[in-house]
Image (spheres, helix red, strand yellow):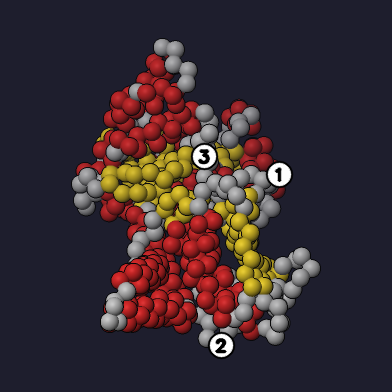
């Protein structure tokens, strides 16, 4: 054989789906099948006689062609991946097999190459590698705990349950928690990130692999049960706030997310993410303490504003006590002491002392620092208590007070002293607004109304200047004040107290044709058993 390919071989190779071509030892192409034409974009009349390396843009050293040639000569065979240039100028990655053709004397006379395009397969592989890399990175780098769980062992158990006639798995799990425990004992942790080791473990990752039930306190096992139910129902995920346990047995609050992607479920795997909420819970607690403190400081500051009224309220009975005591003495010092008058004076002293005591305990109630205590509160009682605080203040500013209290209101669930603080604040704001305006008429109406749904509405209407245009949105912002010595904390604190009791508060212009402002405060009424 002197030609590198026979006519009979050419006929067979022509029908191959792989690209087949034959070149001599100088690289000249002697055979080029239709699949080569399709892969490389050169028709056979252009390829035949051309130099293969030039035609296919082979770069020697970089492609390792020379090494491949050396191996081919040594072994008679070579296989590998080569980058090839096509007629349209784009590169393709081709998997090629070379076999050396020899003449009768054993001298190499040509090379038969078969090849197929692996560019897209390579791209997919690279894409997969990149996405696996990204996933690994995320898995490791996120400040959340990620776990991969293998649940293949519970598949047959679920099937057995369904075969035994269990229809409502969720209800079944609720009444059979030991079954859920058993499922957990057969669900394995197969992978987890470093954050999980820090959050749940003692530093050793391998110690954490294995069954997951160690991490689940009894109170949280229905979270696992709901994951099973939701994944079977084809839902994409289950997200809940729950409690989990570290290897050392410390329980903590967390946000638990399980993802049931179809691909993972098909592999018998689910991915879960856990975010530690215990720090958040601590921060929330600290915030609550701060709000209580702030409300307390605000109460003290209202008492400060009311100090003139308080002094007056205490001085009045004290003056009376002194007057009655002097009168009593005089009745005693008479040549004929009048004991009935003395008794009368003493009774008056007791009454006045009681009045002083009432005022002091009312103020003490407001001034004491104490955590919020919810109870069932009659809003009308709170209104009346609050108006006692402001009574002198209103009279001082010549404000005419009208109270319209609806009968048979349901109680509300709130802290009595805090509600009192809100009402005193609103009444003081109204009195100050009216005192600042020139208007001769100073009228304040405090009203309680039963809303159609049974909820309770409290309204405070004044005849002051009302709310200037553009300010409505700002009044409840912290530190917003239009007063020279104002703090701007009254209304924000009122709002946090009212919202804490599930209600709402607004401050608007009256909207009844009269000038002035109107506070509307709604509170949900307690449903009373009938
Ligand atoms: P402060 O009383 O220290 O200013 P508040 O938060 O209680 O703080 O009130 C914020 C602002 O809301 C007041 O400065 C005032 O401009 C306005 N405001 C409150 N109540 C009334 C009212 N009844 N009429 C008119 N403006 C009011």
Instruction: Give the label on residue 528, or none.
Output: 3
Does residue 36 appear in the picture of this structure?
Answer: yes
Q: Which residue is mark 1?
A: 43
| Neighbourhood count class around disc 3 (C-alpha, 10 Å): few under 14, some 14–19, many 20 upward | few
Name the N-terminal-most of marks 3 and 2. 2
Compare residues 178 and 189 and report the one nearer the observer: 178
User: Which residue is at the far bottom?
Assistant: 484
User: Which circle, 1 or 2, is nearer the viewer?
Assistant: 2
Q: Is residue 36 left or right of residue 221?
A: right
Badge 1 density bin: few <14, some 14–19, many ≥20, Cα 10 Å: some
Kindly state the secondary structure of the residue where label 1 is placed.
loop
Distance CA(mark 1)–CA(mark 3): 92 Å
Camera sees residue 32? no
Label 1 to label 2: alpha-carbon separation:
93 Å
Which mark is first along the chain, 3 or 1? 1
Label 2 sits on a secondary structure element that is loop
Q: Quadrant location of residue 21?
A: top right
Mark 2 lies on residue: 484
3 or 2: mark nearer the eye? 3
Q: CA distance from mark 3 to mark 2?
A: 46 Å
Q: Nearer the viewer, residue 171 or 494?
A: 494
Residue 153: percent from left, percent from top: 34, 26
């Amino acid at each position: 054989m002197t030609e590198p390919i026979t006519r009979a071989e050419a006929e067979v190779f022509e029908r191959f789906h792989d690209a087949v071509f034959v070149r001599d030892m100088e690289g000249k192409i002697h055979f080029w099948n239709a699949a080569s034409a399709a892969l490389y974009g050169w028709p056979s009349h252009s390829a035949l006689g051309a130099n293969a390396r030039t035609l296919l843009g082979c770069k020697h050293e970089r492609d390792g062609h020379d090494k491949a040639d050396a191996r081919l000569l040594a072994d008679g065979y070579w296989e590998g991946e080569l980058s090839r240039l096509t007629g349209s100028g784009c590169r393709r990655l081709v998997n090629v097999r070379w076999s050396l053709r020899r003449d009768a004397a054993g001298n190499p006379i040509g090379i038969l190459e078969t090849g197929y395009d692996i560019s897209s397969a390579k791209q997919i592989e690279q894409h997969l590698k990149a996405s696996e890399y990204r996933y690994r990175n995320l898995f490791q780098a996120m400040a959340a705990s990620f776990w991969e769980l293998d649940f293949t062992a519970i598949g047959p158990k679920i099937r057995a349950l369904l075969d035994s006639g269990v229809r409502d798995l969720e209800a079944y799990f609720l009444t059979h928690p030991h079954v859920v425990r058993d499922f957990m004992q057969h669900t394995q942790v197969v992978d987890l990130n470093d954050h999980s080791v820090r959050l749940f473990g003692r530093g050793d990752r391998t110690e954490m692999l294995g069954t997951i039930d160690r991490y689940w306190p009894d109170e949280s096992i229905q979270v696992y049960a709901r994951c099973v139910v939701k994944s079977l129902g084809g839902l994409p995920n289950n997200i809940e706030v729950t409690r989990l346990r570290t290897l050392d047995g410390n329980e903590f609050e967390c946000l638990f997310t399980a993802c049931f992607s179809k691909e993972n479920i098909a592999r018998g795997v689910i991915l879960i993410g856990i975010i530690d909420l215990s720090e958040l819970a601590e921060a929330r607690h600290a915030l609550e303490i701060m709000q209580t403190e702030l409300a307390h400081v605000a109460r003290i500051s209202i008492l400060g504003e009311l100090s003139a009224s308080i002094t007056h309220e205490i001085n009045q009975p004290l003056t009376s006590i002194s007057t009655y005591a002097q009168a009593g003495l005089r009745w005693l010092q008479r040549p004929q002491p009048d004991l009935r008058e003395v008794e009368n004076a003493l009774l008056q002293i007791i009454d006045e002392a009681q009045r002083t005591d009432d005022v002091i305990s009312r103020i003490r109630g407001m001034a004491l620092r104490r955590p919020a205590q919810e109870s069932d509160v009659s809003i009308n009682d709170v209104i009346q208590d609050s108006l006692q605080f402001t009574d002198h203040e209103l009279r001082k500013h010549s404000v005419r007070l009208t109270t319209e209290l609806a009968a048979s209101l349901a109680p509300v669930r709130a802290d009595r002293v805090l509600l009192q603080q809100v009402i005193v604040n609103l009444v003081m704001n109204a009195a100050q607004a009216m005192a600042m305006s020139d208007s001769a008429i100073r009228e304040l109406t405090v009203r309680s109304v039963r809303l159609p749904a049974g909820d309770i509405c409290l309204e405070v209407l004044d005849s002051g200047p009302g709310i200037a245009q553009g300010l409505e949105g700002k009044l409840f912002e912290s530190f917003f004040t239009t007063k020279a010595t104002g703090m701007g904390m009254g209304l924000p604190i009122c709002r946090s107290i009212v919202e804490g009791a599930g209600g709402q508060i607004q401050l608007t212009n009256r909207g009844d044709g009269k000038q002035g402002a109107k506070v509307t405060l709604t509170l949900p009424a307690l449903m009373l058993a009938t």
